[in-house]
């Protein structure tokens, strides 16, 4: 049998001692960390941790950065730089979860604006989750 193989030719796990630093729990993520995350990190947390408290924290931070979640379209939107409040064509940018980039949104209507999740809805969800 070759080195590291048993009598039947199977690989054996060598004996070793795992250093204590490898078995420690990582420090818990604090809400204050979210303000330091890049937008893409917040989107990753939001879309990949459904029904998790961290998803709510990322939603809250995205809202603080002027991004709004559209309940029907299931996408995050922000106003395009230099545009006035309203629903002008091209006034919004959305985060495309397929290409993982920001893209212009050209289909805004008055009804479109009614689909956004409010800050109050986010706060209520956070309060209920704690």
Image (tube, rainbow, N blue to C red):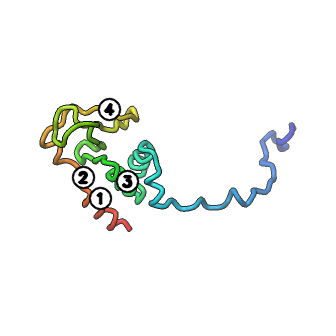
- Assess whether mark 4 and mark 2 are in contact (beta carbons under 8 angstroms): no
Tell me residue 52's x, y (percent).
Answer: 41, 57
Q: What residue is pinned by disc 4? A: 103
Instruction: Looking at this view, name the residue that lies furthest to the left.
Output: 110
Q: What residue is pinned by disc 1? A: 122
Upstream in sequence: badge 2 or badge 4: 4
* Label 2: how many Cα within 10 Å (few below 14, some 14–19, many 20+): some
* Label 3: how many Cα within 10 Å (few below 14, some 14–19, many 20+): many
Q: What residue is pinned by disc 3? A: 61
Q: Secondary structure at mark 4?
A: strand
Task: Report the residue at 28% width, 47% height from top.
Answer: 69
* Label 1: how many Cα within 10 Å (few below 14, some 14–19, many 20+): some
Tell me residue 11's x, y (percent).
Answer: 78, 42
* Disc number placed over residue 117 in the picture, else none: 2
Marks 3 and 4, Cα distance to the nearest angstrom? 20 Å
Upstream in sequence: badge 1 or badge 4: 4
Upstream in sequence: badge 3 or badge 4: 3
Image quarter (top left, top right, bottom left or bottom right) of the N terminus: top right
Picture layout, residue 62 above or below residue 82: below
Upstream in sequence: badge 1 or badge 2: 2
Q: Nearer the viewer, residue 4 or 122?
A: 122
Q: Nearer the viewer, mark 1 or mark 3?
A: 3
Picture layout, residue 81 above or below residue 50: above
Tell me residue 73's x, y (percent).
Answer: 25, 42
Marks 1 and 3, Cα distance to the nearest angstrom? 10 Å
């Amino acid at each position: 049998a070759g080195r590291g193989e048993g009598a039947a030719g199977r690989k054996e796990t060598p004996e070793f001692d795992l250093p204590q630093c490898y078995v420690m729990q990582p420090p818990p993520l604090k809400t204050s960390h979210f303000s330091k995350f890049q937008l893409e990190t917040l989107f990753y947390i939001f879309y990949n941790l459904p029904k998790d408290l961290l998803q709510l924290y990322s939603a809250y931070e995205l809202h603080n950065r002027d991004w709004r979640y559209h309940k029907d379209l299931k996408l995050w939107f922000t106003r395009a730089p230099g545009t006035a409040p309203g629903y002008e064509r091209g006034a919004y940018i959305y985060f495309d979860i397929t290409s993982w980039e920001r893209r212009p949104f050209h289909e805004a209507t008055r009804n479109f604006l009614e689909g956004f999740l409010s800050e109050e809805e986010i706060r209520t969800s956070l309060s209920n989750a704690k």
